[in-house]
Image: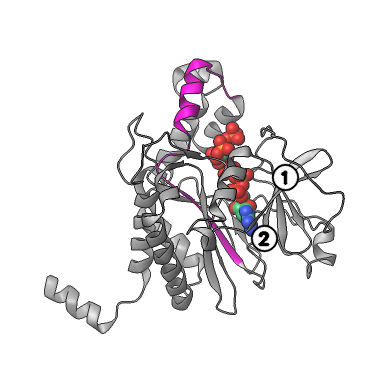
Amino acid sequence: MSCTFCTWPWFEGEGLSVRAENRTKSWTKLKSMVHWSPLAFTLKSRSSWVQLAGHAGNFQAKEGGRLLKRYCECEQQCLNKLMTDSLRPYVPGYYGVVQKDEQDYNLMDDLLVGFDSPSIMDCKMGSRTYLEEELMKAREHPRLRKDMYEKMVSVDPGAPTEEERAQQGVLKPRYMQWRETLSSTATLGFRIEGIKKADGTCNTNFKKTKQREQVMKALDDFVDGNVQILKLYLKRLEELHSVLEKSHFFKTHEVVGSSLLFVHDASGKASVWMIDFGKMVPLPSPMMLDHRTPWVEGNREDGYLWGMDNLIDILSSMLPQTPCDVDRNSEEA
Ligand SMILES: Nc1ncnc2c1ncn2[C@@H]1O[C@H](COP(=O)(O)OP(=O)(O)OP(=O)(O)O)[C@@H](O)[C@H]1O
Ligand SMILES: O=P(O)(O)O[C@@H]1[C@H](O)[C@H](O)[C@@H](OP(=O)(O)O)[C@H](OP(=O)(O)O)[C@H]1O
């Protein structure tokens, strides 16, 4: 069991300047690594932020309960719009672009602030994890990814085709689709990316967590069987679900690779937020999505709400049945 783990306190105002220049992301994702800053222990009271999933080196935790995330124009634009949308209570507060050591960052709230030794879970939402535009680009300029071939072989040596084996590389959409079908992304419309528990254990080994029962087991372990925490998560998800159903912003964006971040602690506090808007792309007007219709190329559907329906259904089924439920179920049978 291992995870990308960064605890990196920074100091408010240190060498930061506001800047609007666009940068593209060009760094590698390093999972299966544990990064502990030596400062993590001495400054724990000031920042207990941890990075559970995503690209290593993407974040810097700042003093004052905020985070710097490496600049991405798409994310900046979404976060800006979200600050005045009905979804505002469900996303981190956003404070613009800042520069540090010639690198631009989006400045946002650290959602772990206010929790004491939190348990955290990252669920990547949707039934598709790459944008349609990425698919088209990969067709126009096919680029073999040796790193993805190696990641594939390390999980399942039998997965690459003969051709891929000969090339020792795979195309990115092929790798992403393989990841989707291996995990619950294709079957349930979401997948668990990582779980870090209050006791310090961290697991990002959910690549093959595919079946409903496997997901339930992981969720039950995450909440340590605590029904009150489950209820709080469910309530918050149901609220978010209803806001998403009505949000014009959500209807008019293709949402890929975005996660729900679940956070709770021993005091009984629990909440969920949407994070990662690097691939939340506006649709050409008047196109709109229902986020449930199965994807066929061109329809831009992403399965986000289908995934949320399934997640809510799974969490509901994990709650103990009340006597009323038992009566109702036996009548139905
Ligand atoms: N606002 C936040 N508050 C607290 N933790 C956060 C916040 N945003 C991100 N994180 C942490 O960082 C991790 C990675 O976040 P995010 O998905 O935004 O990164 P990414 O590098 O864009 O990911 P991907 O590789 O999927 O594109 C999350 O799993 C979570 O642990
Ligand atoms: O989880 P894995 O198996 O490590 O695979 C990565 C994961 O699917 C990321 O979402 C993706 O980044 P994007 O979502 O930003 O495309 C990254 O692509 P990348 O290596 O091209 O960054 C993949 O390598």
Frontmost residue, 318 versus 313: 313
Q: Give percent across and percent down for residue 11.
A: 84, 58
Q: Is residue 133 above or below residue 268?
A: above
Residue annotated with mark 2: 110
Magenta-colored stretch includes residue 129: yes
Q: Earlier in the sequence, mark 2 or mark 1?
A: 1
Q: Could you tell me if residue 175 is visible in this image?
A: yes
The disc labelled 1 sits on which kind of residue?
Tyr
* Residue 248 image point, x, y percent: 41, 50
Determine the secondary structure under disc 1: strand
Q: Quadrant of the C terminus?
A: bottom left
Q: Is residue 59 shown left or right of residue 73?
A: right
Res 72 → quadrant: top right
The residue lying at 49 percent from left, 45 percent from top is 207
Q: Is residue 270 above or below residue 182?
A: below
Q: Position of residue 277 (x, y in %)?
A: 55, 46
Q: Callout 2: helix, strand or loop? A: loop
Query: What's the residue at 66%, 65% (across, down)?
Result: 200
- Residue type, label 2: Asp
Mark nearer the viewer, 2 or 1: 1
Mark 1, Cα crowd under 10 Å, few <14 / some 14-19 / many 20+, is: many
- Against 12, is 179 above or below? above
Magenta residues? 119-145
Residue 24 colored in magenta in the image: no
Sort mark 2 into few (<14), some (14-19) or many (20+) by Cα contacts within 10 Å: many
The structure residue drawn at horizontal position 72% and vertical position 35%, both measured from the top left corner, is: 21
Write the residue at 60% across / 58% down. 92
Q: Residue 53, can we see it?
A: no
Residue labelled with disc 1: 105
Label 2 residue near ligand 1, CB within 8 Å: yes
Residue extending furthest toward the bottom: 323
